[in-house]
Image: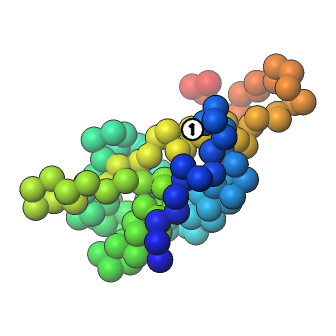
Amino acid sequence: MAAFDHSLYFHQNRTMEEKAAVVSLAALAQPVRLRIFRALVGAGPPGMVPGALAAMLGVPASTLSFHLKELTHSGLVTQERESRNLIYRPALDQMNDLLAYLTAHCCHGTACEVTAATGCTTC
């Protein structure tokens, strides 16, 4: 399966189009992939090697490999080789574009009232 070409699905002002949003959301609509993506977001730009991800999440290497491939094809994760290691990183720009797409029409364009989550002591 070829990687999704995100450049074809953005307006001139970097606004994500529906097809790119659907591809990203579909990649996250699986529990293991969502856990992997959240772990990578938690690691931030330095990313993680597959062995560390597998140990952290308790996921077999072959399963992890399959899900990392799907997240990479969606554009939410990048892969880079550093000597003998593969480093997987969250594509934070893509994540932010997805969040912006999802919230673009929130409250009909007016400022929304933000409320703290019930029981949250750090908000």
Kindly identify the residue that appears in the image at 41 percent across and 43 percent down: 42
Residue farthest along the right direction in this orientation: 108
Mark 1, Cα crowd under 10 Å, few <14 / some 14-19 / many 20+, is few
Please state if 85 lies on the left or on the right of 53 as rendered: left
Q: Residue 8 location, x and y as percent?
A: 59, 53
Q: Is residue 104 above or below residue 40?
A: above
Q: How many numbered marks have been drawn onto this rendered protein structure? A: 1
Establish if 44 lies above or below 61.
above
In the displayed structure, does residue 67 sit left or right of residue 24?
A: left
* Residue 34 visible in the snapshot: no
Residue 95 occupies which quadrant of the picture?
top right
Q: Position of residue 80 (x, y in %)?
A: 25, 54
Taking the view exactly as shown, the residue that stands out farthest to the left is: 83
Relative to 63, 74 lies left or right: right
Mark 1 sits on what residue?
A: 96
Which residue does the image show at 74% across and 37% down from the upper left?
A: 103
